[in-house]
Image (spheres, rainbow, N blue to C red):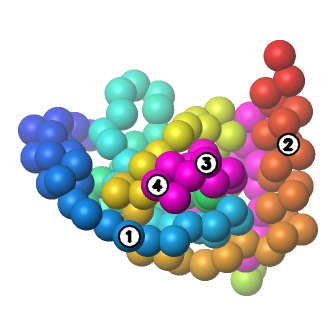
Amino acid sequence: MEKDFDNWNKLKKEIENESKNIIIKEWEIWWTHIWLNIKSESCWKWNKFRRPVLVMKKLSHTNCIIVPLSTQIKKWTWFANYNIEGIEYTALLYQIRMMHTNRFYVKETKLNYRIFNIIKKKLKKLLNF
């Protein structure tokens, strides 16, 4: 797959200049504009560099800690699998990052609190230095 770094840079400039006033909450799933990554880092999905993410921790009204999500199921310690309405998903725990709300595009759903806590415990275990 050829990566379109030039169009990503144009979109980043637009996102930087946007003025958004959205409210985010922990355990929500949002579609976001995730940057074009390199090598084995998970990249965008579909057009406009979009990928769903799970809000793990709200840091302020504009910043939060997120974990990108995927429909490609992985089975190692740095992934957390869960099921919503019969569809299997994977939280990419190893790609945890801070994200500004300007990158948030549209709210998808709210994750079941029990599933959120399972993912949170798995993330804590992974980050135990």
How crowded pointer 4 is (Cα within 10 Å; few <14, some 14-19, many 20+) is rated as some
Amino acid at the residue labelled 4: Thr
User: Is residue 57 one of those drawn in magenta?
Assistant: yes
Name the foreground residue: 13 vs 84.
13
Residue at the farthest bottom position: 85
- Residue on which disc 1 sits: 21
Relative vertical location of residue 30 with respect to residue 45 in this rendering, above or below? below
Residue 37 lies in magenta, yes or no?
no
Q: Left or right of 19: which side holds 94?
A: right
Residue ID for mark 2? 122
Where residue 33 sits in the image (x, y, percent)?
A: 34, 55
The residue tagged 3 is: 59
Query: Label 4: which residue?
Result: 62
How busy is the neighbourhood of tag 2: few (under 14 within 10 Å), some, or many (20 plus)? some
Residue lying at 79% horizontally and 27% vertically, measured from the top left: 127
Q: Amino acid at mark 1?
A: Asn
Secondary structure category for the residue under label 2: helix
Residue 81: quadrant of the picture: bottom right
Residue 98 pos. (x, y %) = 53, 40
Residue 45 versus residue 35 in the image, above or below: below
Going from N to C along the chain, the mark reached first, 1 or 2, is 1
> Label 2 amino acid?
Lys
Of label 4 and label 1, which has the lower sequence position?
1
Depth check: 48 or 24 in front? 24
Q: At which x and y percent is residue 20?
A: 32, 67
Check the picture and name the quadrant holding the C terminus: top right
